[in-house]
Image (cartoon, rainbow, N blue to C red):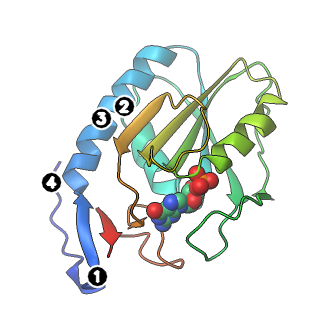
Amino acid sequence: MSIEFDQSAIVPSNYHPMISEKKIQERLEELGAEITADFKDKRPILIGVLNGGFIFLADLIRYINTDVEMDFIRISSYGNARESSGHIKILKPLSADIKGRPVIVVEDIVDSGLSIQFLQNMLSAFSPSELKFATLLHKPSKNKTNIKLDYVGFEIEDKYVVGYGLDDEQVKRNLRSIYYIA
Ligand code: 5GP
């Protein structure tokens, strides 16, 4: 896939390239193939975690070659800060009925792991038949939990990253590649 689109006008000088658009798409094709094999004819519900997970979910489902349903949930833990407060609120609840259904939670990034721990507790109470986690990015050095991440795009160092859905104080989500701020 190669679509040339110059976004340099919205990339500040303290942003440094980390993962290119091409690398992201290549990895998504691999993850999509794994999910297709694992969930063939099982009609999983993919739950995108807003706001950060929306682009990852939108691209990922187009690399999946079996029927899937989708829904979104919105939780908040950070506000505008860059460190997790640990206080997680549900800002938009699920709409789908996940009882007895296979579910894949689709996150942008696992940092402290507190968000997915919260989601695991909350969603298992609805008795899905399976509950799996997909994340585009994982910071293993920061993750305080031992929740199994079933599909991981990239493991990264402890840096604040932006682009491809991830924000810098609510902007820059539209960048097609991932950058770190330094
Ligand atoms: P956790 O609960 O695992 O600490 O953090 C999960 C949420 O924090 C992510 O869904 C994301 O919204 C936000 N987050 C964590 N690390 C980063 C980062 O490096 N960049 C951005 N933009 N958001 C992050």
CB under 8 Å between callouts 4 and 1? no
Label number found at residue 2: 4
Instruction: Give the labeled residue for mark 1.
Output: 14
Instruction: Give the labeled residue for mark 3.
Output: 29
If you read the primary sequence from the N terminus, does the residue marked by circle 4 or circle 2 appear first?
4
The Cα atoms of the two marked residues, 4 and 2, are separated by 19 Å
CB under 8 Å between callouts 4 and 2? no
- Mark 3 crowdedness (10 Å alpha carbons): few <14, some 14-19, many ≥20: some
Q: SS for tag 2?
A: helix
Q: SS for tag 4?
A: loop
Q: SS for tag 1?
A: loop
If you read the primary sequence from the N terminus, does the residue marked by circle 4 or circle 1 appear first?
4
Name the foreground residue: 15 vs 3: 15
Instruction: Give the labeled residue for mark 2.
Output: 31
Kindly report which numbered mark, 2 or 1, lies closer to the viewer in this rendering. 1
Kindly report which numbered mark, 4 or 2, lies closer to the viewer in this rendering. 2
> Of the residues shown, which amino acid type is indicated by label 1?
Asn
Q: Is residue 166 visible?
A: no
Residue plotted at (30% across, 30% down):
30
The Cα atoms of the two marked residues, 4 and 3, are separated by 14 Å
CB under 8 Å between callouts 4 and 3? no
Residue plotted at (65% across, 67% down):
78
Kindly report which numbered mark, 3 or 1, lies closer to the viewer in this rendering. 1
Please say if 25 is above or below 177: above
Q: Is residue 155 left or right of residue 145?
A: left
Name the foreground residue: 2 vs 116: 116
If you read the primary sequence from the N terminus, does the residue marked by circle 4 or circle 3 appear first?
4
Residue 40 in the image: x percent, y percent?
A: 48, 14
Kindly report which numbered mark, 4 or 3, lies closer to the viewer in this rendering. 3
The Cα atoms of the two marked residues, 3 and 1, are separated by 30 Å
